[in-house]
Image (cartoon, grey):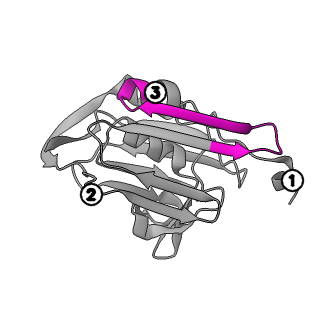
Amino acid sequence: MIYEQTLADTITFTGVGIHSGKKATLTCKPTTHGGLCFYRTDQGNQKIHVSPHNIIGSNRATILAENNIKITTPEHILSACAGFQLNHLAIYIDSEEVPILDGSAYEYIKAFKKVGRKQLPTKVSPIKITNPIHVIDGNKSIEIIPATTYTFSYQLSYPNVFIKDQSLNLTLSEKSYEKEISQARTYGFEHEIKT
């Protein structure tokens, strides 16, 4: 069992959604319960719980929805929450799309580090993988194998474009997350912009 955590103070970010082009203000407020939740301030503070059950789309951007209210492109802020080990956070946003900032999770991590974390009195059991899991979807796959460390291997292949083949092997820690994962940038292709 490990103690749950939230931010030690409130932080506000302002930026533009990469897909919508709309300005958005996002405010992260510490909370002691409820997990990670978005609140759409432009929709009467409608709540969208961060849950796999609320994913309604994931083609080049994740879409979360609850009671017909959506949050789009939350990947970077949620990555930062995971990397900074936050269990509970109220995320207030005045638009459907989360601001892209610099195209990575790094701006969120830098701000989180500035205000710090608050340890909560509640504990949670980490997820423990006891049997291998393998999922294949077309030419994409993921395999999860029991291990004593958080070790990740990733391979990407776009042989006909400038990205080519890339791979990363990483033992995950807060330090390696900040250096190797949080600074990874969103990319797109010209033909996607034109459509």
Which circle's residue, 2 or 1, is located before the other in the chain?
Answer: 2
Residue interval drawn in magenta: 156-176
| Residue 128, numbered circle | none
Q: Quadrant of residue 117?
A: top left
Q: Residues within 10 Å of mark 1 (few under 14, many from 20)?
A: few
Residue 55, compared with residue 34, is above or below; it is below
Q: Residues within 10 Å of mark 2 (few under 14, many from 20)?
A: few
- Kindly identify which residue carries mark 2: 34
Q: Position of residue 145 (x, y in %)?
A: 36, 50
Q: Are marks 3 and 2 in contact (CB under 8 Å)?
A: no
User: Residue shown at 48%/58% (left/top)?
Assistant: 41
- Kindly identify which residue carries mark 1: 191
Which amino acid type is marked by label 3?
Glu
Q: CA distance from mark 3 to mark 2?
A: 26 Å
Q: Position of residue 102 (x, y in %)?
A: 63, 33
In this image, 195 relative to 106: left or right?
right
Disc 3 secondary structure class: helix
Which amino acid type is marked by label 1?
His
Q: Residues within 10 Å of mark 3 (few under 14, many from 20)?
A: some
On-image quarter of the N terminus: top left
Which amino acid type is marked by label 2?
Gly
- Kindly identify which residue carries mark 3: 178
Q: Position of residue 138 (x, y in %)?
A: 63, 65
Disc 2 secondary structure class: loop
Residue 1, compared with residue 72, is above or below; it is above
Viewer-side residue, 174 vs 35: 174
